[in-house]
Amino acid sequence: GGENGKGRSEQATVCCYCGTGCGVLASAEGGRITAVRGDPAHPANFGRLCTKGSTLHLAAAPGGRALYPKLRDARAIVGITAATTPRRRVGWDAALDTAAERFADIIRRHGPDAVAFYISGQLLTEDYYVFNKLARALVGTNNIDSNSRLCMSSAVSGYKATLGADSVPTCYEDIALADHLLIAGANPAWAHPIVFRRIEDARRANPDVSLTVVDPRRTETAELADLHLQIAPGSDVLLYNAMLHVLLAEGLVDQDFIRDHTSGFEALQAQLGSCTPGEVAAACGLPAAQIVEAARRFGRARAALSLWCQGLNQSHHGTANNAALIHLHLASGHIARPGAGPFSLTGQPNAMGGREVGALATLLPGHRNVDDAADRAELARLWNIPALPAAPGLAAVQLFEALAAGRVKAVWIACTNPAQSLPDQARVRAALAQAEFVVLQEAFADTETAAYADLLLPAASWGEKSGTVTNSERRVSRVRALVPPPGEARPDWVIVADFARRLATRLGRDAAAFDWRDEAAVFAEHASLTAGRDCDMSGLSHAVLERDGPQQWPFPAGAQRGTARLFQDKRFATADGRARFAPIGFPVAHALLPEPVDARHPFVLTTGRLRDHWHGMSRTGKVAALWGHTPRAEVVLNPANIAAHGLEVGELVRIANPRGELVLPLAADTGIAAGQAWIPMHWGSASLAQPGANALTSPAVDPASRQPALKQAAVAIKPARLP
Ligand code: SF4
């Protein structure tokens, strides 16, 4: 901290929105956060902030906060609509004792897998760690998953399939060192604006840096591209395989790299057979010449860097999409050197931290895996417990399906809003409505999910809690508290540790395993579990971060600084050190879209972010300055479709499929291809008085990553005046 010249104390912390992880200097006065500016010393942003980050102080004390623990004595929830049975204010002891009693009772009667935890990429690493230890080590279930499942789990499985570990090999500095940038299924101009500033800087500094953008929409990012591939939704895997075919046909592969540092190339090459640009052009909705051009730009580059996000990940073949893109890097040797490599962007501020602590159903701390007996045994020893559960845990969509089916009786939700953000919203709400016991640990009392909570626990929010986050480039930064939480709200890890001790007592287990002096002690325990792993941060501590500033892992014990890039010795995280060309079953064994369009549902719906809003708008929706850019939710169609379907711009239309419907004003945009429809993801019942985009989205998941295909659903669009 320090003085900012106006007599206010200024603290270095991190923006709580996107995974760019920008450093923020925040000022507080009289118990309120009064100003923010970009931290010039933070390597993620060097002082810059986007519109969302620069209004953090205006969102820091919004209305709608949860202030006191509140308990509903009797469930009176009908259908999928929460009834108005009031919750009454209770003290923390009563709240947590009740929760411990209910969870212990359900665990005794139905076993540990009858409870589940659904948490968030917006929690701090310390929060995440305590939740994970509670679920695995105390309750004995792998039923803990995170909303990061909706965001980057296909990138995790794509990296593991090819590089051998969930290790993003690149860093932000590579943007300035590449001479070719491939942005795939991402709109960083809006979703990662400070990353995008770097891309603009790189192209300004060197006009020879070429940019290819792959996106079904002509976004603000695509506007800047030298080559925009306006791909048909769902056809990504075909495009990247066809690009690989071109690299091979035109001698643009790095045979030495393939021979010395990879495995599986011949098998993939055999599978590629007929995957020529001409063969896939129609399915991709692209001229074959554009595919050839994209491949040549990639293959002929000195250093090619690819950046991607939800367009690849939120697909029922998201792992294949990720692997196919990474294959381009392996085949052409655009990896393991500065300026070259694959770089998945994380959506949420601490999605990466959640991966490190293993807060996904399939993972364990330190990038260990639930399905690896040696990993489980090692962690059981480190946690000093007899064994870890081996039964696979339920991932997000499955978790709420199990809740609906009664296999899971109680769910503890933290810092996320599944009643709005999961696909097929009606099913999720029905599941919450008929659960035996729902706990919601939240900063905000006015989310869609809050209506279903039997117990609402008030959590501290940004600026009120302390810990760490890890951004897209593996950089761990300190997040700091500037003001006390409002009412009786508490930091998330404190709530969970308190609950865990009470539950341990009731289950006859060791409560001391959940006794930490402070968040630095939680981090120290977490970091110690990563020793020797690919994400080794055993040399990091809150004290080191205080002294030396944000650091990238690996940061093993004894290291003086973090590691900017991985695999620079061209040894990958596989058993033989070779990166793998993954056998991905090409041609894709199933349909490119999770559900085909038909005469009744002729539009492919895609969803996405706006520039100035974040997730369900719990924060950004309360900042007047952020409403100027896009003041209302609309459904956007290509003008040709509007005319052909007898619709009019501005009229209210009904967007529907068997899962649900929305009524929105209609807008026209030539940047949307014919046959597609686009709506922003941010609105929901709380802001729109009707369900949001996820009333319509598909619950189909990728079989490997279990990430849902949120980007594609078949819908009908008709004038709202007609039945
Ligand atoms: Fe915050 Fe992301 Fe904007 Fe940076 S780019 S200020 S992390 S929202």
Image (cartoon, rainbow, N blue to C red):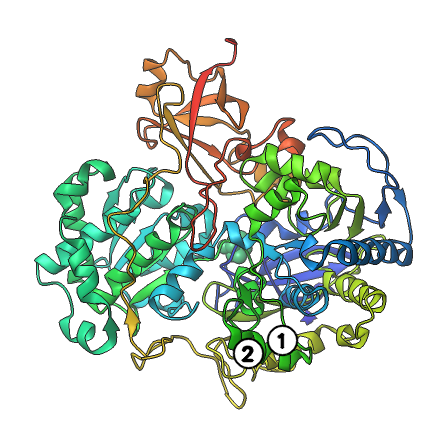
Residue 304 can be seen in this image: yes
Q: Label 2 is placed on what type of residue?
A: Thr
Residue that appears at 83% across and 70% down: 508
Q: How many marks?
A: 2
**Which circle marks residue 526 in the picture?**
1
- Residues at discs 2 and 1 in contact (Cβ within 8 Å): yes
Q: Which residue is mark 2?
A: 530
Which residue is at the front of the view, 165 or 251? 165
The CB of the residue at mark 1 lies under 8 Å from ligand 1 = no
Q: Residue at x 19, y 42 (%)?
A: 280
- Where residue 297 sits, quadrant-wise, is bottom left
Q: What is the secondary structure assignment of the residue under circle 1?
A: helix
Does 208 sit left or right of 419 as displayed?
left
For disc 1, the neighbor class at 10 Å (few under 14, some 14 to 19, many from 20) is many
Q: Quadrant of residue 101?
A: bottom right
Along the line of sight, the residue nearer the viewer: 99 or 419:
99
> Could you tell me how far apart the alpha carbons at marks 2 and 1 are, in whole angstroms?
7 Å
Q: Quadrant of residue 550?
A: bottom right
Mark 2, Cα crowd under 10 Å, few <14 / some 14-19 / many 20+, is many
Tell me: 625 left or right of 653. right
Q: How far across and down, in percent of the image, does residue 598 sit?
A: 35, 23
Query: Amino acid type of disc 1?
Result: His
Question: Taking 516 as reference, is 527 left or right?
Answer: left
Residue 42, x across and y down, in percent: 52, 69
108 vs 6, nearest the viewer: 108
Instruction: Say which residue appears at 32% left-offset and 58% top-offset.
Output: 323
